[in-house]
Image (tube, helix red, strand yellow):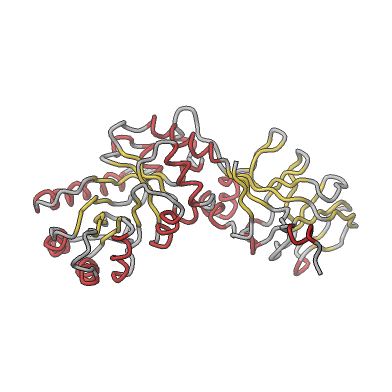
Amino acid sequence: MRTPALQRAEPRRDTRAEVDREAIRSNVRTIRAAIPASAAFMAVVKADGYGHGAIAAAEAGLAGGADSLAVAFLSEALQLRRGGIRAPILVLTPIPPGEAPIAAEWDVMLTVASAAWMAEARSFKNPYSPAKIKVHVKLDTGLGRLGLRERGEWEALVPLLAARDVSVEGAYTHLATAGGKDTAYVETQIRRFREMTGWIEASGIRPRRYHCAGSAAALRFPELAMDMVRFGAAMYGFCDPRWMPPGGLRPALRLTSRLVQAKYVAKGERIGYDNGYAMDESGWIGTVPIGYADGWGQGLQGADVLIEGNRCPIVGRIGMDQLMVRLPRDCPAGTTVTLIGEEAGDCITCAELADRIGSVPQEISTALATRVERMYK
């Protein structure tokens, strides 16, 4: 039988992510100061707040001055509502039409990308419910992902949007190349968006807000702020240095673990699955309890970690639960390993790791699995 002490104990892993909520609040304040004061601020907290924790990120963003929130799916919006978040929420991906009444009852705004979806969504709504279906119309100006493209599609949608149980809260698009060197395609998309908003105005529909700019577009081209900007990556500290706002942005995530073992390995011996690494000279190898099941994928083989102020490369194939690093010397079990964050004047960023796998910083943070405990500052 367990002793009372053991019954109260909660096992904790050495691998954990520390989330700095003040960094998110500060980033939102910094961004607000860099965009036109007339533009509303929509904080994007999809994918569990880009891996930082959805509710914590939403609360920090709102505390920093955000006016509303955006998520990818209705389930994410309901998580926020059940967590006590009362701010306006937009779901960016069209949901199954039969779930529109749920969104209406929880006061969640939906993306509409076709007349067929709107008609079906209204068919599910209880005609006696006072709750309206609140929508933002998505316009595809060149990303090729979601939205209306032709005027005929808009005209088919107009009578459905004019219904008494529908409220048109916004119309928006998303830019495909806002971070690219050549701005010609951005200009093409903006011209197309203005043409399409002309259709809307001519129809008599009056959305409350027009918006087109995400993090990169809003910081790089403040003139595109329109009525609202959508900030995701930047509020977590992910920003291209070329359009970093005055004062800079702070990374909100730190990922650490601890060595579980260090061993001396002779020259020529092999390390890891498939004998993936051969010791070019004798030295110390450390084992760290994090692997691809935690979101630290095999593409990060060769990346550095920080141990006692030293950059130590990951060697051999990354396993499901552990990885190995080349140590400069014998280090005791329990020594801190920094995978993301600052240590002794050096820093490993999500951007550095993303460059290794040919991706973006937010892929690194969103890949972190739920079994990696989040600790909030």
Task: Find residue 158 and report its horizontal and vertical position in percent.
Answer: 13, 60
- Residue 270 position in % (x across, y down): 83, 63
As drawn, which residue projects farthest toward the top? 247
Q: Is residue 179 visible?
A: no
Residue located 81% across and 62% down the image:
3
Q: Nearer the viewer, residue 43 or 242?
A: 43
105 relative position to 343: left or right: left
Q: Residue at x 34, y 53 (%)?
A: 90
Residue occupying image coordinates x 53% and y 49%: 361
- In percent of width and height, residue 92 lies at 35, 57
Quarter holding the C terminus is top right
Camera-side residue of 315 and 292: 292
Visible residue check, residue 76: yes
Residue 80 lies, with reference to residue 341, above or below; the image says: below
**200 left or right, relative to 354:** left
* Quadrant including the N terminus: bottom right
